[in-house]
Image (cartoon, helix red, strand yellow):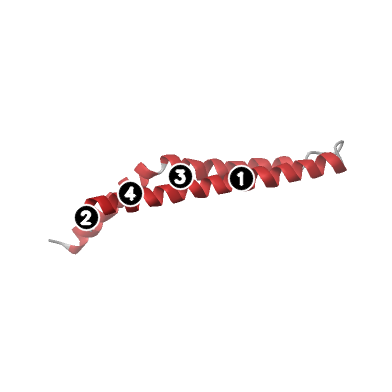
Amino acid sequence: MDEDQLLRDRAYRIAEEKAGFYIHLVAFLLVNAGLWSLWFFTSPTSFPWPVFVTIFWGFGLVMHGAGAFFGEGYTESLAEKEYRRLKEKRGP
């Protein structure tokens, strides 16, 4: 496999991760909009219970975004470290 194909494969994996984040973001926005609307139109004077969903799911969304947009370098360094460990274990 040539270097150009390796770069294409890597770029494809990165693009998949970013696309997965965007899908996650749209689902987050739509579901939370629905939950907040449900609360607002049924019991706006009661405790705003959708806040729990928004906060906890929002935290997961932020972590997903961090992994998709900033995690590549970390993953690459872990993979390189693991490769060296396995190579040493196997010997020359």
Name the residue furthest top: 45
Tell us which disc is closer to us: 2 or 4.
2
Determine which residue is flagged by label 3: 68
Residue type at mark 3?
Ala
Report the residue marked by disc 4.
78
Amino acid type shown at disc 1: Val
Distance from Cα at disc 1 to Cα at disc 3: 15 Å
* Quarter of the figure that contains the C terminus: bottom left
Name the image quarter holding the N terminus. Answer: bottom left
The picture quadrant where one finds residue 47 is top right
Give the mark toward the camera: 1 or 4: 1
Give the distance between the C-alpha atoms of the residues marked 4 and 3, in whole angstroms.
Answer: 16 Å
User: Would you call the spot at circle 2 few (<14 residues within 10 Å), some (14-19), or many (20 or more)?
Assistant: few
Say whether residue 53 is visible: no
Q: Which residue is under mark 1? A: 26
Q: Would you name the residue on which mark 2 appears? A: 2
> Element under label 4?
helix
Label 1: few (<14), some or many (≥20) within 10 Å?
Answer: few
Instruction: State the image quarter where residue 70 is shown.
Output: top left
The residue at 21%/61% (across/down) is 89
Q: Nearer the viewer, mark 3 or mark 2?
A: 2
Residue type indicated by callout 2: Asp
Of label 1 and label 3, which has the lower sequence position? Answer: 1
- Front-most of residues 19 and 38: 19
Q: What secondary structure is marked by label 3?
A: helix
* 9 is higher (above) or lower (below) than 71: below
Q: Residue at x 63, y 48 (%)?
A: 27
Q: Which tag, 3 or 2, sits closer to the chain's start?
A: 2
Q: Earlier in the sequence, mark 1 or mark 4?
A: 1
Q: Classify mark 4: residues with Cα within 10 Å, few (<14), some (14-19) or many (20+).
A: few
Residue 74, horizontal then vertical, whole percent? 36, 44
